[in-house]
Amino acid sequence: MCTVSFIASGCRRLITSNRDEHISRPLALRPQEETIGSVKVLFPKDPKAGGTWFALNENGSVAVLLNGGFVNHVPTGNYARSRGLVLLDVIASEQPYDLIQEMELLNIEPFTLVLFNGNLLEFRWDGHQKYYRPLDAAKNHIWSSATLYKDEVIEHRRNLFRKFIKQNSEITPNEVVDFHSNNHDDFENGFIIDRESGLKTFSVTQAVLDEGEIVMRHMDLLNDRFFEVPFSPTQLTF
């Protein structure tokens, strides 16, 4: 939930996320399908809070969470709900965009949410106010968590991403995973981190949306395990 990329490669959309956590946090459960309300949702579950940082639903929507809004905030520790549960509320809605506008986020820790449903939306909650930024779903985008990376590091990572895009004309899912699985000679600020504080990259998760079908790919880096779960949405709107 600390690095996310969105890549438009021909008719395919690739959404990929790195989950960075302290080593004291339990590993996520493998991606499984659940019905939440009336909507089928596929996601890897965080056993600590029951939420997730990456989920997709049967209507073809994908939602990915990053820690923090715009700046590195100081956590208060007494929040009303987990941000991962907020994400599940959004992705389990028949109208995710409408729910984001309506939902009450008072006393929820700041976060950034990337939501794709044919359209691409960057949503940020800074702890006080909501911010919406529609993005071009035919272009490529990358996000880095404001809680882990300074502005100059975020720009450096953005430049690495631009270089990767420029060097690859038609990008495959495996190439994106390889890019996300590289420390780029920097375990402190690379895409795979291993900090002395105990913060590590736990996993890389990817949604591959391609002509009416979705596949979720989940790489458990700590246990060297790989899961690939096909998911058949009722519709894809891109």
Image (cartoon, rainbow, N blue to C red):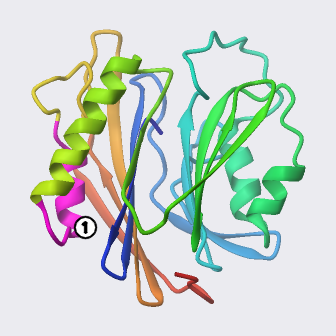
- Which residue type carries mark 1? Pro
Q: Is 34 or 125 nearer to us in this picture?
A: 125
Is residue 197 among what the camera can see?
yes
Is residue 178 among what the camera can see?
no
Residue pointed to by mark 1: 173
Above or below, comparing residue 65 to residue 165 in the picture: above
Asked if residue 134 is among those painted magenta in the image, a careful observer would answer no
Q: Residue at x 20, y 39 (%)?
A: 160
Which of the 4 image quadrants contains residue 186?
Answer: top left
Label 1 element class = helix
Which of the 4 image quadrants contains residue 215?
Answer: bottom left
Asked if residue 174 is among those painted magenta in the image, a careful observer would answer yes
Bin the neighbour count of mark 1 within 10 Å (Cα to Cα): few under 14, some 14-19, many 20 and up.
some
> How many numbered dots are placed on residues in this image?
1
Residue 194 image offset from top left, x and y in percent: 25, 22
Residue 221 image offset from top left, x and y in percent: 26, 44
Q: Residue at x 24, y 37 (%)?
A: 159
Q: Which residues are magenta?
A: 168-182
Residue 217 image offset from top left, x and y in percent: 35, 65
